[in-house]
């Protein structure tokens, strides 16, 4: 794995890509933990994602959620998924920022 692709993500578990349904379960599970506040981990890393797999993933991208951002490294077959915060969480962060500024 190229170090620059995972730089800063050393603490993130790396998953072997085992198909879209498995990936979707992992995304849903981690997203649920984020929403509940049980985790602050926004990243999932998958290895052995081939270009053909990526094409299939792109075909079902909308079912993976609008809250995901993906980065694919062709030379290492590495897919990094970032789970974006929910709208509710973003509003809470905004309110906290406003409160801090007003103080």
Image (cartoon, grey):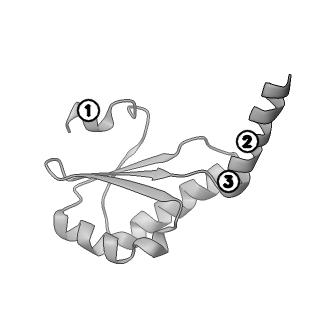
Left or right: 42 in relation to 88: left
Secondary structure beneath dot 3 equals helix
Instruction: Name which of mark 1 and mark 3 comes first in the sequence.
Output: 1
Q: Quadrant of residue 22?
A: bottom left
- Disc 1 versus disc 3: nearer the observer: 1
Whether 51 is drawn above or below 13: the answer is below
Left or right: 53 in relation to 92: left
C-alpha gap between disc 1 and disc 3: 29 Å
Left or right: 76 in relation to 7: left
Number of numbered tags placed on the structure image = 3
Secondary structure beneath dot 2 equals helix
Are the residues at dot 1 and dot 3 in contact (C-beta closer than 8 Å)? no
Q: Which mark is residue 4?
A: 1
Residue 86 in percent (x, y) is at 65, 55
Instruction: Name which of mark 3 and mark 2 comes first in the sequence.
Output: 3
Residue 73 in percent (x, y) is at 22, 49
Split into 4 quadrants, where in the image is the C terminus?
top right
Residue 33 in percent (x, y) is at 63, 52
Whether 84 is drawn above or below 6: the answer is below
Split into 4 quadrants, where in the image is the N terminus?
top left
């Amino acid at each position: 794995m190229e170090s620059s692709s995972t730089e800063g993500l050393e603490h993130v578990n790396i998953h072997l890509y085992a198909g879209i349904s498995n990936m979707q379960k992992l995304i849903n599970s981690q997203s649920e933990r984020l929403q509940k506040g049980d985790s602050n981990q926004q990243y999932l890393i998958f290895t052995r994602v081939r270009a053909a797999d990526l094409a299939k993933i792109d075909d079902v991208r909308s079912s993976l959620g609008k809250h995901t951002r993906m980065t694919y490294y062709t030379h290492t077959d590495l897919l990094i998924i970032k789970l974006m915060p929910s709208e509710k969480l973003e509003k809470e962060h905004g309110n906290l920022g406003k409160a801090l500024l007003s103080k």
